[in-house]
Amino acid sequence: MKRVVIMGIDPGLANLGWGVIASDGTRSELLEFGCLTTKADTPTSWRLRFLYEGLAEISARFEPALIGVETLYFARNTKSAIDVAQARGAAVAAVASADTPIHDITPLQIKQALTGYGRAEKNQIQRMVQTILNLEDIPRPDHAADALAIAIACAHGMKRLMR
């Protein structure tokens, strides 16, 4: 299979991680990663617009063939869940305009894809990202490392996801 560009997105209103890799489904290479950060004292609508515009620009620059977005998995704090859901919606809308397949991926699927164990700890996932992408250090901030883990998990299932 030829190498394709894959983007991973770790949604959040305060910190939205993103990572872009190139992969053939077996070997993956880091292209770029980062985190879009918004301030709590900024109106939510402005924060969402910033996330939307930032991801739309990143997606246009890299033109990914596949995008993975982590699904929401918590509901203890309703306010946080709503904020993350809104950020996730802005992220999906920003990248959906490119007509690229978007794969919703759960934390369990990410852990299983990277470590083979669904209850892997965060530091285990980060070490696997470092190892798989042959990096000197664990990517920082954590949200960006999580986004790269999402992209790698999508790369592992790429043949199935791109149908």
Image (cartoon, rainbow, N blue to C red):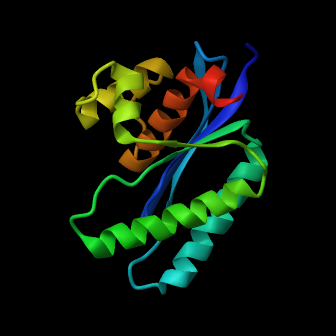
Could you tell me if residue 14 is visible in this image? no
Looking at the image, is 42 positioned above or below residue 59?
A: below
Residue 2 image position (x, y, % from top left): 76, 16
Looking at the image, is 90 positioned above or below residue 5?
A: below
- In the depicted view, which residue is nearer to us: 97 or 144? 97
User: Residue at image x 68%, y 67%?
Assistant: 53
User: Residue at image x 39%, y 29%?
Assistant: 137
- In the depicted view, which residue is nearer to us: 124 or 37? 124
Residue 160 image position (x, y, % from top left): 62, 24
User: Residue at image x 71%, y 55%?
Assistant: 96
159 lies left or right of 157: right
Q: Quadrant of the N terminus?
A: top right
Residue 124 image position (x, y, % from top left): 27, 27
> Residue 111's image quarter?
top left
Could you tell me if residue 129 is visible in this image? yes
> Residue 163's image quarter?
top right
- In the depicted view, which residue is nearer to us: 45 or 39? 45
Residue 30 image position (x, y, % from top left): 59, 29
